[in-house]
Amino acid sequence: MHSGTIVATAVLAPWLLYTILKINKATHYLQLNGYFTGRYLCWVMGNLTRVMSWLDILPLLSLALLWLQPGNLVYFLWGLTYLIISIGLYNTQRQTGVKKKLVYTSRVKRLLVLAGLLIAALCVWAIQSLWLPGIHVETLLVLYVTSLLAWFLLLLANLLIWPLEKAINYWYYQDAEQILADHSTLKVIGITGSYGKTSTKNFLNRILAARFNVLATPESYNTTMGVILTTRTRLKSTDEVFIVEMGARKKGDIKEICDLVRPSMGILTAIGEQHLETFKDLANIKRTKFELIQSLEKGGIAFVNWDDENIRSLPVVPGIRYVRYGIMADDLDYRAGSIQYDARGSVFTICSRTGQKGVFRTRLLGRHNIYNILAATAVASELGMDMASIALAVRNLSPVEHRLEMKRGKDYLIIDDAFNSNPIGSKMALEVLSKMEGSMKIMITPGMVELGSRQYELNYEFGRLAAEVCDYVILVGPRQTQPIQDAFKEAFYPPEQYFVARNLNQALQHLNDIVKPGSIVLFENDLPDTYNE
């Protein structure tokens, strides 16, 4: 075998393995950041210690040997170094684990193909250089910098492929638009809010399914592309109602979905401080959520949570009928009252302005779940269902996964509220915990994120409330939970009653050490992988 072939193989094969591992990990975090270049770049720059490792120094040290002992031996040391750090990176990724794995969608595959072509072009150039006699320091340096900056190489690939992705998305949009146009009798119900969207969607789906053929966007498919995917792959000619959850991270997101599906009914569950990193302030959140009501067809119906002061402050859209629901406010069309909680769930009544009344029992916990059921009941009632039929469907509702979901531990009760906590939701979860009877009330939490300039203040307030309710608190992440720790100190919460864990695994191990039979354990929020410390 030609010596150039041996050298090129020794140099490139281990280097390629390491670079591919880094590219794959970078792709995962690009996907977690919604493929948004700016958001991904901000995350990378804020987490340089995670995207680069001290192991990256080792290949550079092997290059330093060139000045001490030039020769082909350096190439093999280089290759051996990359092989060692590849094994180290692989083991680290496997041991660390992730909550949400990389999904190899068509978009991801296209992105990886383009990144692969860029790397392949670099390999061709490197092979041509390494084939020639001599020591090629500049070639090794270029390869080293490329692997070191692999996360930025993926950023380049994402920028290059953006025009193609935009064209593909536009074609998908037009195709979904045509499918919806062919379903001229389809009644579209839009749902948005700072919290409660998914639960309300699921509850409404279960209730309406007793009378109508219903399609709802699955899981948290609440982006434009999620709605397009649902329309193109799941909508059937026999469907009568399409329930569309609408999420947003910036102004115009909800309007874009509404322009596609053209809802005749809209539910506004609540408006609060969430995703402040992108919205910046509450005013922008209010304007964005209001896009659903503004987009309703003339003669449409807006179902609004009238207990929410931010919703009450919104202007009235002419030509739209408003149906107001709530528990405490005046002038309500649908009101829930006589609320009671026990170990089996919740019991309450719902009365309409027209005199309809029903007694509702559900396994679900929390005041916010009552609001969600109340919204779904109002819609179902306006579509012609009677209270008895609605109450029967509500009795059979299952908790939405990780949203105040009751579970049984070995000899204690778990309240799983680990999905995407927010200031209002966390307060309601603590309210539920305070009303439960148990030998010990324990909370495990990493705090809340994406709250912008108010992150410290809102987590501090969360800590203050937790100190009043919890007998013991396990905090996940020393840096992330610092505001809660400060609140505990200010409230003179005993240091022996809380523990700061490095990660969730350590938190669960500590729980096993301190939990007592008959305890109630609240899991409040579970941060995405981008927030691991």
Image (spheres, rainbow, N blue to C red):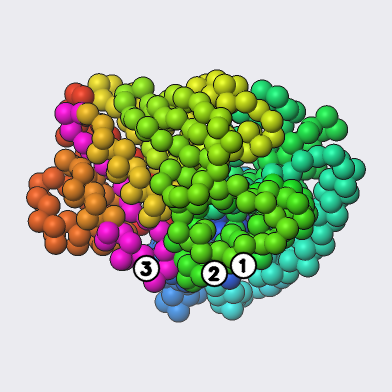
Relative to 235, does residue 318 appear above or below in the rendering?
A: below
Question: Which residue shows up at 59% across the image and 59% down it?
Answer: 289
Question: Which residue shows up at 33% across the image and 53% down it?
Answer: 447
Looking at the figure, which quarter contains the C terminus? bottom left
**Callout 3, which amino acid?**
Arg
Q: Are marks 2 and 1 in contact (CB under 8 Å)?
A: yes
**Callout 1, which amino acid?**
Lys
The tag on residue 222 is none
For label 2, the residue is 284
Estimate how packed mark 2 is, as few (under 14), some (14 to 19) or many (20 or more) residues with alpha carbons within 10 Å: some
Relative to 61, does residue 384 appear above or below in the rendering?
A: above
Distance from Cα at disc 3 to Cα at disc 2: 15 Å
Labels 3, 2: front one: 2
Estimate how packed mark 3 is, as few (under 14), some (14 to 19) or many (20 or more) residues with alpha carbons within 10 Å: some
Residue stretch in magenta: 438-461
Q: Is residue 303 left or right of residue 311?
A: right
Closer to the camera in the image, 34 or 24? 34
The tag on residue 454 is 3
- Count of marks, rendered view: 3
Distance from Cα at disc 1 to Cα at disc 3: 20 Å
Label 3 element class = helix
Label 1 element class = loop
Relative to 330, does residue 415 appear above or below in the rendering?
A: above
Residue 233 in sight = no
Residue 471 in sight = yes
**Callout 2, which amino acid?**
Asn
Question: Which residue shows up at 75% across the image and 51% down it?
Answer: 299
The tag on residue 251 is 1
The mark that comes first in sequence, 2 or 1, is 1
Residue 108 x/y as whole percent: 68, 52
Estimate how packed mark 1 is, as few (under 14), some (14 to 19) or many (20 or more) residues with alpha carbons within 10 Å: some
Q: Is residue 393 magenta?
A: no
